Amino acid sequence: MKSSVDDHLGNYHVYWKFNQTHITFEVHVKTRGYVGFGFSPNGKMYPSDVVVGWVKDGVPHFSDCHTVGHFQPVKDISQDWTLLHGEENNFGTVLKFQRPLNTCDDNDTDIVDDTMRIIFAYHPDDPTDDTHMPWHGATRRGAKSLLLLSTSKQYKLPNDSQTKDLVHHQFHIPSKRTTYQCRVYSLEDISTKHHTIKFEAVIQKGHEPFVHHMNVYKCHNYPRKYIGRNFECYTVPVDMMPCGNVVAGWAVGSGPFHFPPNVGLPIGENEKEYAYVIEIHYNNPGAVTDLVDSSGMRFTYTSHLRQYDAGLLTVGMRENHQHIIPPHYNEFKVQIEATKECISKGLTEASLDEIKLFAVWQHAHLLGKGITTRHLRNDVELEPIAEDEHYDFDYQETRLFKKEVPVRKGDSIRVDCTYDSTLRNNITYGGLSTANEMCFSFIYYYPRFPLYMTTQSLLYDTIPGHSSLLSFSWDDQSSVEELANLVETYDWTDDSVRSKFQQDVLNSTLRSTCCWKHSPVYTTTTLKLTDPSVPYQPPTSICRQG
């Protein structure tokens, strides 16, 4: 069974397993009173789908319930959970229960291959019955996001496995909200080709709240004079900045990532031509002082080469003031795309008919509500590559696919990011800070081809009243400032203003840039994204069949 400790005290443990139709949970809770467990779209008691159980005088009691407010749950008419076992032991209470992934009950939450927020609670006493339960209190409850149907696997490592740590060395974290700190490494000591088969974060104990995410960049022809240097990533000369060719990434909530047994990430190839830049995003909103950190990334690698070399394709929105998320939106969407032209060019240059995608890490910041990485072929939308309708900023993980996704000439990859800005009163712009926003999909695939990144910016040519950004130069920010000044005057509390701006964004021209390995030349074009002529139709729900 998979397992997760769901509170910081070790009082509530969850184990689970699943198959194609059902899921089974087993909870071990340090109490001899009642136990609550459930699913909630927002991590709160309401609205939620819950079960409540306890064991009294050796007899287990168990009910399938739902909430209609922040008070006593209501028992479902349809009892869809099956209690398999209940007991009290030296630790506390153990309950094992099972239900179908989809019950067709409107009061139940479908269990899907998506981020799901579980909620939990417990009380030291048994209730008199399932309609009179005392409040569990503020300290005996919690929530946690999980990928319940994840296929992430851990493989036995070869006997010759070695590790390489790319970490900071006693870096003094500044007492400011956001710091992007870089350190440059050379791997010239690995003189022959090896395969990285696992990577994981190495977080200094006690610094977990401050290390938000990190990337490792593999940079071709990076100046050797910078090797060993430690610097703030984006306040230095351009030739010193990270190059954009991400080979590994980690974010809060992630665990170790194991590559599939037929794939490895190459290292040890002509390492004198490369440098590796470890970039860590430190998040210190409380301006805590005297933090000295040595966190970073650990690579596990082997000389036993696997069948294929892995690559990573980054699809993202440029982190600048052209990425605008206004306030008061429950759902505000932006779209970006790795175009069929760039993908086809990469395949042609590598003499490949297709690449196969096998994992993804989707990334946004605090306003992120959902991210979908979509797959289009000849104006027909195929099954999504990855879909996360309940994105959680505090739970990001590189997800291994259940089945590989072939991408061929003529295919494009589109990323939709949806934001919830209902609690903001001002515009949120794209940027590096946690308080800013991002939209990225980092996609692992094999075999390698030369396209490593495609980024896009909105030009807002659909908005009247400002200079066109179609001829915008990155060296001249005047048009961007003019646009920012204009949208700052909008009344974002007006539904019609918000609706019009959303349509303007979705209909805007995009400037798209494709970046190629070993080439200083970028491919830059403009395009408008249109809906596919044949949209994807998910399989008919079993509740609607017949």
Image: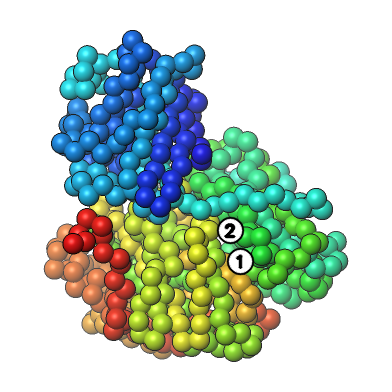
Q: Is residue 305 left or right of residue 2?
A: right
Q: Mark 2 — residue?
A: 249
Residue at left offset 63%, top offset 80%: 450
218 is higher (above) or lower (below) than 531:
above
Residue drawn at (73%, 47%) of the image? 169
Side of 445 relative to 416 (left or right): right
Residue 120 in percent (x, y) is at 36, 32
What secondary structure is found at the residue carrying circle 2? strand
Which x, y percent locates residue 138? 33, 25
Image quadrant for the C terminus?
Answer: bottom left
Choose top left, top right, bottom left or bottom right for residue 269: bottom right
Give the spatial CA distance, label 1 vs label 2: 7 Å
273 and 43: which one is in front? 43
Residue 408 visible within the image: yes
How has the structure been colored for display? rainbow
Task: Give the label on residue 246, or none.
Answer: 1
Q: Amino acid at mark 2?
A: Gly
| Residue 504 left/right relative to 521 | left
Q: Position of residue 29 (x, y in %)?
A: 43, 23
Q: Secondary structure at mark 1?
A: strand
- The amino acid on which the numbered mark 1 sits, given as a three-letter code, is Val
Res 192 quadrant in image: bottom right
Q: Residue at x 86, y 66 (%)?
A: 191
Camera sees residue 360: no
Tell me if mark 2 has few (under 14), some (14-19) or many (20+) residues whose alpha carbon lies within 10 angstroms of its own. Answer: many
Question: Could you say where residue 260 lies in the image, as x and y percent from the top left?
Answer: 62, 60
Mark 1 neighbour class, 10 Å CA radius: few under 14, some 14 to 19, many 20 or more: many
